[in-house]
Image: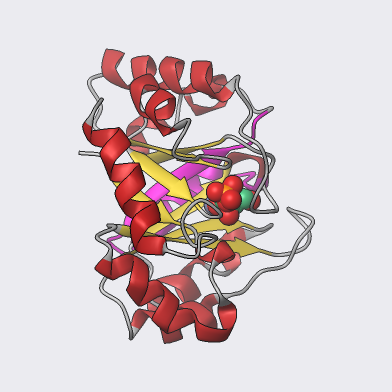
Amino acid sequence: MVKLAPSMLSADFSRLAEHIKEVENAGVEYLHVDVMDGHFVPNISFGAPIMKSIKKHTNLVMDVHLMIENPDMYIEDFVKSGADIITVHQEACIHLHRTIQNIKSYGIKAGVSLNPATSLVTLEEILPELDMVLIMSVNPGFGGQSFIKSSLDKITILKKMIDDRNLNIDIEVDGGVKVDNVADVVKAGANIIVAGSAIFGKEDVKRAVLDFREVIEKI
Ligand code: DX5
Ligand code: ZN
C-alpha cells in the first residue's frame, strides 16, 4: 500500500496543530518532519521541541528527515520528542553504520537518504540494516522545487537492489512530487510519497489528498 507523507515544511506555522489535523482527517498516514540546520542544507527549519508539541495533537506516524550535520547528537532528542522513523543523510554520516544502530537501539525505524548526486552504490553494505531509503528528488533545503527526472531511474534501480536481496525496505521519495508525476514515482517502486507544496501548500488539503489517492488507486 502506498502511504502519503505530507511535509510539515509547507504547513502554516501560525496554526500548525490545526493544519496537521486537516491532513490527518483527510486520511494520510505519515507526517514528514523536515529538520534543517543551515549547515548541511542552506536553510533552517525547526527542531525537536516543535515536534514534541505537535505530537500531542496528532496520531500520525512521525517521519523525521534530518538534514543536519552530526545527527548522532540529536537522535535521542528526536526519539524523546516522539519520532517513529528517523532518516539521516548518507552524506552527513561518517560512521553511518554506527548512526543506524544508534537509531535502532531506541526501537524505532531507521532510514538513509541520498541527495540527487549521491550514488546508490553507497548503500550496498548498509542496505540490510535499513527500514527505509529516502531518495531525494530535489536538492534538499527548500519546498516547492522541481522534480529531478533522473530520480525515476534511481528509484527503479533501488527497488531492484532491494528485491534482489529479498529485503523488506520502504522506498520514500521526497521533492517535487505532485499529482501529475506521482504515478511515475510509484510505478518506479516508491511506496511512501512525500508532498509538501502539493498538499500543505494547497488551499483545500482534503481535496489535494483525494487527488493523490485517485491517481495512486488507478495504478
Ligand atoms: C526538501 C524537503 C522536502 C520538501 C518537499 O528539502 O526535504 O521534504 O519539503 O517539498 P515539495 O513537495 O514542495 O517539494
Ligand atoms: Zn524531507
Residue 104 shows up from this direction: no
Query: What coloring was used for the rendering?
Result: secondary structure
Which quadrant would residue 201 be assigned to in this image? Answer: bottom right
Residue 185 in the image, given as x and y percentages of width and height: 43, 28
User: Residue visible at 59% across and 60% down?
Assistant: 71
Residue 5 in the image, given as x and y percentages of width and height: 39, 53
Quadrant of the rendering where the N terminus is positioned: top left
Viewer-proximal residue, 128 or 60?
Answer: 60
Q: Is residue 81 above or below residue 121?
A: below
User: Residue visible at 27% across and 40% down?
Assistant: 214
Q: Is residue 110 above or below residue 76?
A: above
Viewer-proximal residue, 181 or 160?
Answer: 181
Tell me, yes or no, whether the highlighted magenta stretch contains residue 88. Answer: no
User: Residue visible at 47% across and 51% down?
Assistant: 87
Residue 103 in the image, given as x and y percentages of width and height: 41, 58
Number of numbered discs: 0
Viewer-proximal residue, 68 or 3?
Answer: 3
Start-end of magenta stretch: 92-116
Viewer-proximal residue, 107 or 189?
Answer: 189
User: Residue visible at 26% across and 25% down?
Assistant: 219
* Left or right: 155, with 175 as reference point: left
Residue 124 shows up from this direction: yes
Which quadrant would residue 63 be assigned to in this image? Answer: bottom left
Residue 52 in the image, given as x and y percentages of width and height: 43, 82
* Left or right: 2, with 50 as reference point: left
* Left or right: 184, with 12 as reference point: left
Q: Is residue 87 above or below residue 122?
A: below
Q: Is residue 130 above or below residue 199?
A: above
